[in-house]
Image: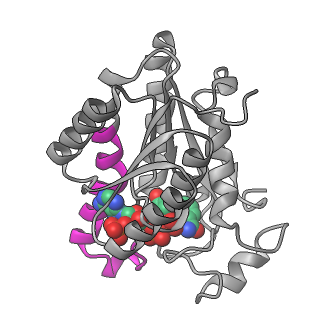
Amino acid sequence: MSEQPLAGKTALVTGGSRGIGASIVERLAADGASVTFSYVADHQGAKEVVERITSTGGTVRAVETDSADADAVRDTIAEVVAISGGLDILVNNAGVAHVAPIEEFPLEEFDRLVAVNVRGVFNTIQAAVPHLPHGGRIVTIGSINADRVPVPGIAVYSLTKAAVAGLTRGLARELGPRGITVNTVQPGPTATEMNPDEGEFAEAMKALMPVGHYAHPTDIASAVAYLVRPEARFVTGTSWDVDGGFAV
Ligand code: NAP
């Protein structure tokens, strides 16, 4: 295998300004891909990611595109294709959470979680698929909470992550004949702004994992890096738990 397994490939990663998404962007760029990532508000984070990657010779672009805005996503993908000549890899990482018991869960938050975590994933895949070649790759960052919910208050978040696991299976069936693989990576607790490893729930979460500690975002990026390589062509429709044993 060449040292840069993604040389010549173009990738789009949603939500790349920090956390797991930033780590995926950095890894795919290090593996040789030309990477565009989206974000909404975190301009400083996006700038830092671009600077880190360009300073080491990688190719990266940041775009301000809300995953929940289907028209904006379509325009962004058309722009990536126009600039780079194609799109080989889509990583749906952008996601939001809200924690509250059901009686207090605002419907606006329900709608926001579904708009970004489910509809946003759907409309991004829908806009990308016409451009993906044979050998194309779709990876969605789900969550181990799709399968295991050990604390109250995250029912709606879990719903959204179970939804994308189902979408992945259905689309793997649909796109397999076109040589496109579709997979979900299901992280366990990962140290980011969304889920700090010193946060309110951190000790309880650590106790649930055989490894006894949170993931670093690079742990999740490593799994994505494998799935998007040519050698992963036989892996599709799966939900891959990268969770320190959270689900056992
Ligand atoms: P994070 O630190 O909050 O980062 C989220 C990223 O997504 C940011 O770059 C954010 O940028 C971007 N984003 C949010 N809404 C967006 C939208 N509507 N359109 C485009 N970009 C958007 O979260 P994270 O922990 O890295 O989580 C990344 C993914 O992993 C999410 O799907 C999350 O559900 C999943 N996950 C996380 C954990 C964990 O323990 N951390 C575990 C399992 C799964 P802006 O603020 O600029 O919009």
x, y percent for residue 10: 44, 34
Q: Is the N terminus in the top left, top right, bottom left or bottom right quadrant?
A: top right
Count of labels in the image: 0
Which sits in the foreground, 112 or 84?
84
Which sits in the foreground, 128 or 153?
128
Q: Which quadrant of the structure image shows residue 50?
A: bottom left
x, y percent for residue 214: 71, 72
Write the residue at 64% across / 24% down.
230
* Residue 102 belongs to the span the image colors magenta: yes
Residue 26 seen in the current view: yes
Q: Which residues are magenta?
A: 98-124
Q: Which quadrant of the structure image shows residue 32?
A: top right
* Residue 68 belongs to the span the image colors magenta: no
Residue 155 seen in the current view: no
x, y percent for residue 136: 48, 24
Which sits in the foreground, 151 or 98?
98
Instruction: Work out whether 166 lies above or below 189.
Output: above
Asked if residue 214 lies left or right of residue 201, the reply is: right
x, y percent for residue 181: 54, 25
Q: Which quadrant of the structure image shows residue 38?
A: bottom left
| The image quadrant in which ligand 1 is located | bottom left
Asked if residue 48 lies left or right of residue 207, the reply is: left
> What secondary structure characterizes most of the magenta part?
helix
Instruction: Work out whether 21 lies above or below 127.
Output: below
Write the residue at 31% across / 40% down.
124
Q: Is the C terminus in the top left, top right, bottom left or bottom right quadrant?
A: bottom right
Write the residue at 35% across / 32% down.
84
Q: Quick one: which residue is furthest to the left in this view? A: 71
